[in-house]
Amino acid sequence: MAATVEVGAGPEGVAVTDDAVWVVNSEAGSVSRVDPTTNEVVATVPVGFSPFGVAATDDAVWVSNSNDGTVSRIDPTTDEVTATVELPSLPGGIAADDEQVWVTGFDDGTVMRIDPRTDAVLTTVGVGRAPNGVAVNGAGVWVANARDATVSHVDPATDTVVATVELRAGTQPAGVAATEDAVWVTGFGTATLVRIDPASDEVVATVEVGNQANGVAATDDAVWVVNQADGTLTRVDPATDEVVATIDVGASSNGVGASVEQVWVSRFDEALAVRVDPDGD
């Protein structure tokens, strides 16, 4: 491990940008901003009750607050909350790009779209039961439905589900990450990583990883999976769909964020963010 940083209590989701690492502290009701050049916390931002997911763009950091039905918007230039979006249901995972923000409604089987220009909910789309992770790429929006063992493909042009991808029974899909040519879904119940072709909406590979595969992050040259029960981080090569490294990152690890140059994992029980060198494995 390249560095270990103390954050707030109960860290969960992680988002990585070029100049910041954002770690959601669910028990502290805050978000820690880590400077990747110094590996130090440079800001702690109070958000809502039980924050869970985080997504970051150049202009905003979006945090889903799972127990108060809101999303907090943070301005990365000031490290302050500039908007709190009220939701019709309790949120789970969250994903964003410059034009759209999507957050799952875990309790009512929906995914909600937020307009980043107005900080208002635009629409609510019915998906499967207990939707958890969500990701966005050029092909659409991808939602993991934990209780159905399915992934919903939503077309943002029409805000409708255009395909439902069936996974193996017992998969309990958790995290989702997407690049332009692949959608990656962790199987919490089957210790697997599933690859979906976004062009065909079909499962094209299933990779065995570790027990309770949870958080996932993807770049063009690597897919990173946190195995919660094992305390490990699995690296998968997207060119071969094979495991190329398994790294011990410690007990209670669950969230992961990555760029080409850096990988960060949250460790819930120890209130730590762990940095992994992607070239050192």
Image: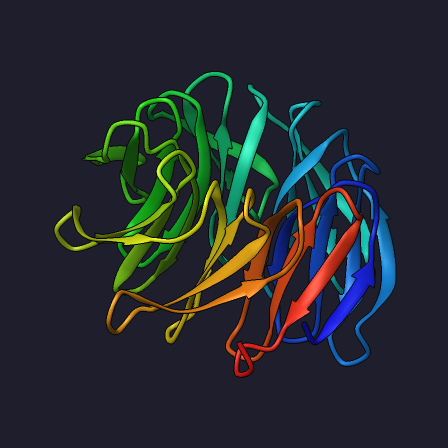
Q: Is residue 168 above or below residue 267?
A: above
Up-down: is 78 above or below 202?
Answer: below
Please indicate, yes or no, whether residue 268 appears anywhere in the rendered image: yes
Quarter of the image for the N terminus: give it: bottom right
Front-most of 146 and 188?
Answer: 188
Identify which residue is drawn at 63% across, 60% down.
249
Relative placement, left or right, of 97 versus 55 is left
Give residue 151's quadrant in the image.
Answer: top left
Going by the picture, which residue comes out furthest to the left? 200
**Residue 43 falls left or right of residue 53:** right
- Residue 36, image x, y percentages: 73, 75
Residue for point 44% across, 50% down = 210
At 63% from the left and 54% from the top, the residue drawn is: 14
User: Looking at the picture, how far across and down is residue 116, in whole percent?
Assistant: 56, 48
Residue that extends furthest to the top in the rendered view of this protein: 108
On the image, the x and y values in percent for residue 255 come to 59, 50
Residue 147 point in image, percent of width and height: 37, 22
Task: Indicate the quadrant where residue 257 lies.
Answer: bottom right
Q: Nearer the viewer, residue 128 or 97?
A: 128
Name the image quarter holding residue 178. Answer: bottom left
Residue 96 visible in image:
no
- Judge whether 104 appears above or below 193 on screen: above
